[in-house]
Image (spheres, grey):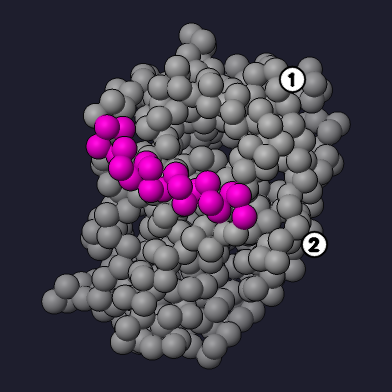
Amino acid sequence: MQRDLLVIGGGPAGSAAAITAARAGLSVTLFEKGPYGRDKVCGDGLTPRAIAALDELRIDHSVAHRINGLRMIAGKKERELLWPTTDRFPNHGAVWPRKSFDNHLLDVAIASGVDVRFECEALPVLEDNRCVGVVVGTEKFTAPFTVLAAGAQGQAAQILGAVRDPNETFGLAIRAYAPTPRHAERHLEACLSLSDEHGTAVPGYGWMFPAGDGTVNVGVGALSTMKGFKKLNLNTLLDQYSSLVRESWSLGEYVEKPRAWRLPMSCVRRSGPGWVAVGDSAGFVNPMNGEGIDYGLESGMLAAQKFIEDPVTASQAYDREVGERFDSFLRTGRRFSFIIGHPWLLKPGLRVAVGTQKAADITLAVMGNLIDSSTPGAAGRVMRIADTSLRLADPLLRRTRAKA
């Protein structure tokens, strides 16, 4: 079957690409490995940047639980901040459980004319190093452009070479849902001073994301740069964190068994002749918070837009523009993760992160994915300085990284 555009993966990034292309009149087929209504393990938080992307996509997000800010906790220090009002992003985010969120986007894609095929594992087909389509079982689909949006890199990514850089940071996270009378709160809560059962500081954080439906998404995430990462027991870490917040949140028992997932934070190759990778498949995950939904939505839209503008140069144009938008910040985050992998550097760093109002505002911008190459003000300046200084320090950071 011949199509204009093929999309592998039905998460936010894949749906964003498919919706954008279909609305422009292209014939699009999207392949989702899971069934309709499948759940995706996630923290469920949408940053103001993600809300802006949904607005650009003309997606009604009124059913999501509105979030007005972030409560950051580091040791005994606590700061509750509102999302800033800017000319780029709205001053609110949301919590929208992925089972409902992803299905809503797929429903919009279907209504936009996308041929969505569930329970289909699509694998790229290469001819003379060009992606010419996909195969699903014995059926072949051809198209001049294929968008890889399959999440954490799997078999489709391996065929295209869009795999994680083994020398770079990645993360692991685990989440559960639990009932709480505080489910309708308007602030996310992030505990930045996380420790394992041995008291070792963990580069990551614990979160409480109120869903507004009687439950809270409670979870923890950790970076691979910490010593002993391979021995880290996520279930134990989650239980330990839950015990810390149980009283203050009047937290009930988990609604279901906790589920864990991997967070890719790099990609060796995110484009090639006839294809591009978007979202998690391209490694677009902020190492400082594990968030990637906003980057997924933006990169998905950009991939389709570049193909609509010029099918011949779409891959190169996408790679260049997405790099200009994300690379500097994400590269800085990965390098910084090597620093906070050392407990003796992590603890004083956390004190600085929330120690003053100005520092907390910058931390808020980092945790909210509100910084990129065009960010004005103090946050943008700090990140540009960090990018330069950490680039110079990169060889030392890698030599002295904490051993897993």
State the image coordinates of residue 156 (x, y, percent, origin top left). Answer: 30, 59
Of marks 1 and 2, which one's residue comes earlier in the chain? 2
Q: Which residue is mark 2?
A: 62
Report the residue at 65% width, 31% height from top.
354
Amino acid on which the number 1 mark rests in the picture: Arg
Please tell me which residue lies in front, 113 or 349: 349
Instruction: Classify residue 400 as left or right of residue 50.
Output: left
Amino acid on which the number 2 mark rests in the picture: Ser
Q: Residue 110: name its quadrant.
A: bottom right
Q: Which residue is mark 1?
A: 246
Q: What is the span of residues highlighted in magenta in the rendered image?
A: 377-397
Please tell me which residue lies in front, 150 or 329: 329
Seen in the picture, residue 83 relative to 55 is either above or below; the reply is: above
Seen in the picture, residue 323 relative to 380 is either above or below; the reply is: below
Seen in the picture, residue 225 relative to 27 is either above or below; the reply is: above
State the image coordinates of residue 375 (x, y, percent, origin top left). Answer: 57, 59
